[in-house]
Amino acid sequence: MTKRIAETILLYGFIGIGTTLGLAFLAAPSVSINAFESPNAQRIFYWHVPAAWAAFIAFGFLFVGSAMWFFKRSNAGWRMHVAGAEAGLATGLMTVWSGMVWGAAEWGVPWDWTDVRLNTFGLLTFLALFLVLGRQSQPDGVETRDTFSSFGLFGFVLVPVTYVATRLWQIRHPGPVIGGGEEGSLNSEMGLILLVGAISFTLFIIGHMLMSMRITSLEQRLESIQEAMDKV
Amino acid sequence: MAEEMTFLAVAYLGMLIAIGLWTWTVFSRSNDLEQRIEAVEQSMQTNHSNEE
């Protein structure tokens, strides 16, 4: 039943993402050619912002799961940690990739090593990469889980830093478009497409995390059956 | 202008294909594990009934 729910949520999310991209390409209003070097590349924003939103959901999931494992020794918490790390890596890469595509078109360079927002988000993605690869290379056990959970707990500090980075140090990454005061105003059509994107990416990443939790549970079940067989 | 739209379309398609592939690997991992568990459980049942 959970599998069906996860699959359904994921499917709706995927369709929604496709719809968002279609709307961004065909229906989103154009921006002023004076305000941007590459006005059409700005349409990547309808992918980039919802992907970053989904990444923050995934890192929140990772943080809660890490805390549940670290303080309560909860197996469900560990499954949340694994799902959050995998989803954080995927959405982090989506955000970084789309940002680099836009940066290459608008700034002439895909990355700016002096920009705080870019670097803290890049570090978050590397943290997720470390957690995913680290888990695959280490035998499962309490010590391994404790180590990776502590990284999940402390690494979460980068999330609020990333969020406030463009408010405190606006270097190259544009300022906030939502919740940023008068400067961050979007017209209603842009806001609507962005909302469709945010809802779609949220559904997509929740579906993925549910599927990932299920996979971890199946892996643990298979391992315990094999251990039982070895004992016989 | 047309070149920019082509660039954007390629980027969009690439990203859609990437998340499609990721989703497909997740589904195939899940199905593979289910089949393995089913096979192991069946083999355990067979062994158990043979012993009886």
Image: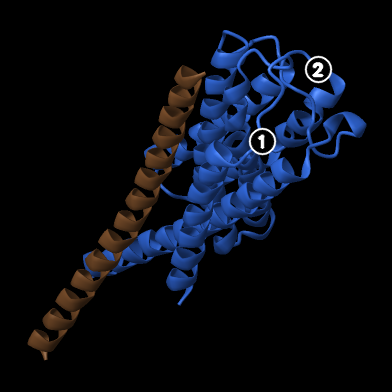
Q: Quadrant of the N terminus of chain A?
A: bottom left
Q: Quadrant of the C terminus of chain A?
A: bottom left
C-alpha separation, residue under disc 2 versus residue under disc 1: 26 Å
Furthest-right residue in view? A182
- Residue at 45% across, 60% down: A11
The three-letter code of the residue at mark 1 reads Pro
- Residue at 12% across, 80% down: B47
Mark 2 crowdedness (10 Å alpha carbons): few <14, some 14-19, many ≥20:
some
Can I make out residue A231 in this image? no
- Residue at 43% across, 58% down: A216
Q: Nearer the viewer, mark 2 or mark 1?
A: 1
Q: Please, is residue A29 above or below residue A73 in the view? A: above
Is disc 2 in the same subunit as disc 1? yes
| Residue, disc 2 | A170
Q: Is residue B25 left or right of residue A116?
A: left
Q: Position of residue A137 (x, y in %)?
A: 38, 37
Quadrant in which residue A223 is drawn: bottom left
The three-letter code of the residue at mark 2 reads Gln
Mark 1 crowdedness (10 Å alpha carbons): few <14, some 14-19, many ≥20:
some
The blue chain is: A
Pick the residue in front: A102 or A162: A102
| Residue, disc 1 | A29
